Amino acid sequence: MAIVSVFSAWIAAVIFTETIFQSSEPLYDGVPNVENGIPGLIVAIVLGVFCLSSIRQGLVMALLAMAGIGGTIVVILGAVLGLNLGASGLKMVGAGAWRAAAAGIWAIIATVSGAIAVLGATFEARPKLMSVLKITFGIVTISVAIAVFKIANSQPTALIMPALPIAVGVAIALLSMSIYISWRCLLEDKKFTIIQEISRILFTLGGTNFGNANLENADFSQAILKSADLRHANITGTNFHLAKNLDLTRVDGTILSNPPVRDLVVSRRGVRKSYRGCNLQGANLAYADLSDADLTEANISKSLLVGAILERANLTNIQALGTNFQQAYLTAACLENWHIDAKTQLENITCEYIYLRNQQRERHPASGIFREGEFSKLFQVVVDTIDLIFRNGVDWEALIIAIKEVAAKNYTEKLTINSIENKGDGLIVVKVNVSENADKGKIHQDLQQKYQQQLKIIETRYQAELEGKQAQIEIYRQHSAEMTEITKLLAQQGLNYHHLPSRINKLIILTLGEGNFDDGFPVTALVCSHEHPLPMTFTAKLPPAPNILQLYQQWRQIYRSQNWFGRITFDTEDTMTNFSRQELNYYGDQLEINLDNWLNSIQFQPIVRELHSHLTLREQVPIILQTKDIHLQRLPWHLWDFFRHYRQAEIALSTIGERAGKLQFTRHQTRILTILGNSTGIDVEADRQVLEKLPECETVFLVEPTIQELHQQLWDEQGWDIFCFSGHSSSQIDGSTGKMLINQTKLLGIKELKHALTKAIERGLQLAIFNSCDGLGLAKELADLHIPQMIVMREPVPDKVAQEFLKNFLTTFSRGESLYTAVRQARERLEAWEDEFPYATWLPILFQNSAEVGMSWGKLLPDK
């Protein structure tokens, strides 16, 4: 190749030099011979274009540029000289074109052959490279001498000396081009891909041929693969770690044809490198270091990443089907929209946390770290599922019955709901787990048929039960629509059940839909846990129970007639009549019995059974009751015998459709704003003493403040964590509004503090405590501002009961117990006062924004 290159450069130099000097013969009276200069001009331009284009755009583009520009010059000169000199002008242009074409062809041959020669010598060994360069230098010298001799025979003696440097310069320029191109080929410059391919073809002649071979899981670590042919071979799992000369191997039709991928497979070091969109399918990257690497939209399916370091790597939109991640390190990696399947192996992964969105957004878990094995459980995909598609909502009762009947029909099948996905535009996909060898087609068909049959049965039954009350059918239909809205909420915003304190693993949300005590309420239960990426969903119904509402109203009237209250300001109901303690106890007992029977009714058992199957007796379980019905909110739900079995569970109220506000923290200690309102007839100083003893917090007291003073504190730029009101308050009978007496004369509602409270919530206000009477109206208005948590009293509260509850709650809460545990323990400790103040344990109730569940004293601030 070196000899061919030098010989070609010599010919090109001879053509160029001879053409130039032929154009130097003078015309008449010493005027230069312009006509003879035309061929030399064309040759010079063609060779110049070739060299410049090769450097900037590569050989292929240089060839096209040389042909295009050379052809254009020939056409223009031919037209000009043809008009002025006639046939002689055209003859000169034609001669120049032929010489230019010949010089260009030989220049290409010289450059390509020289580049291949240098590449070959470089790949073989450095001594051979020096030998080639020595031979090249000798041949260049001889070639230049021959070129000068040939020119001397055809030109005057005076032109020999100028010819020498021109010939040498042209030859050396073309050979320098060869060296430059070979250097760019070593860097795998895509502009010279054709040279690289020609070199590989020549260098692999006679080498080992693995073309189309099955090399799956073969071991080529540290092997010398010079001159091998791996075209279209199956290299899934093949070990190329530290293999040598892989860049001299023909690898067309494999992932190794991409230089960055080839380097990664060999070195297994990709720290902070970009492999965006690369095809790494089947690559063996065991124990590779890919820290901070960008693998966005890459395909690593069936790749071996055992023990690989992927910390802080960007795996957005990555294809990882069947990929082996066992023992890999994934802490702080971004897994936004990554695609895995049941064959993706996630066992024994080391991962403290990940991000679900790019640029380190949506940390998961939101606080703390994954426990051992938790990551694998969260992301492992179950393959054996059937997709049931619903386009106009789902009747969950019909679906559950259909699943049970089909499972009973196929004795070997255990059918369970795997997940519920909202695809938008009313489309819901329910995935049902089946066994590995199940006849999925038949089971899918049976489920569809049974579902349609149950739809008709249920509709007929409800038509008969409701005796033509079409409005009630619409209520039932709305229940299905509510499930769609719940699923949409989970998909778009999500319940922050991952924010639960570490000791709380599950969260239950009971949603009571539109209904009444005469016709019943549809109920949806969501069971959220750290163990499942999607909540489990169950449905049932609470049957008609008008006696419960009647009993509660009787009990409430008698309760409010007692004279032990101190923290109520006014009452909007009719004048009360005194009743005996026996009557109060009678209606209280009857209400407890009927409420418990209602919650243990057959229609509600599907939810009860599922709750028992998914909970353990010692688990701390928040149960959030979502309803807009004020009568349901007033009921003493803690009397349900469920809470007698699950001693660590606690009930909280929530309105349907709440959304969490954005919390921004700038504080370094817990801050409490306490309002000590009108103290007529009560002892608010007892509340003050409790608050002053709290550890690690700053408490500001406003004693009977003006509305302006209260506004000023709520707007404090440092913000507040807890707002506490002690004094007199009351609510409207429908629970729509409430007011508190902040001083001797001012009754203040939430509406009058709307902007100030909204700003306080934005700055991190998480808990409001209204240690005052009848606070459901206050809670309703404040919930509309999306505060995370509130504690209020359902009914008028005796002063001593209020003091004891606040003391016990804050003592337990500040010790580190969860909010739910602290509320339950403080409420149950009021039992000691029920001989003097009956039904004290019925009064405190937690209000919870369902999108912001989870709170403890130690986590009021994120930097704690």
Image (cartoon, rainbow, N blue to C red):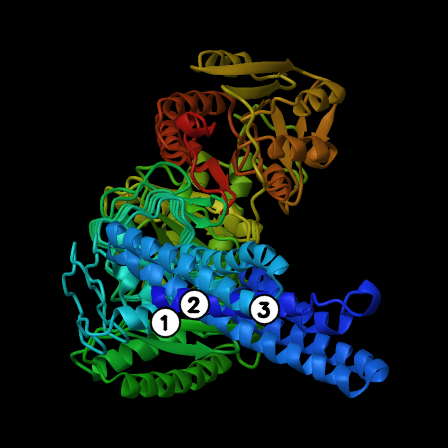
User: Can you give x and y, in whole percent of width and height, for residue 485 in the image?
Assistant: 53, 63
Confirm or deny contact between disc 1 and disc 2 (CB under 8 A).
yes
Q: Quadrant of residue 524?
A: bottom left
Indicate the quadrant containing the N terminus: top left, top right, bottom left or bottom right. bottom left
Give residue 112's mark: 2
Residue at the disc numbered 3? 18
Q: Is residue 343 visible?
A: yes
In the picture of the structure, the residue carrying the numbered disc 1 is 198
Q: As drawn, is 572 to the left or to the right of 597?
A: right
Where residue 673 sits, quadrant-wise, is: top right
Distance, label 3 to label 1, CA atoms, is 32 Å
Q: Nearer the viewer, residue 309 or 663?
A: 309
Instruction: Name the residue rendered at 62%, 64% in the picture.
Output: 156
Q: How many neighbours does mark 3 have within 10 angstroms: few (below 14), some (14-19), or many (20 or more)?
A: many
- Residue nearer the viewer, 793 or 266: 266
Eyeballing the image, is 661 above or below 315? above
Question: Which amino acid does the dot numbered 2 rest on?
Answer: Val
Amino acid type at image mark 3: Glu
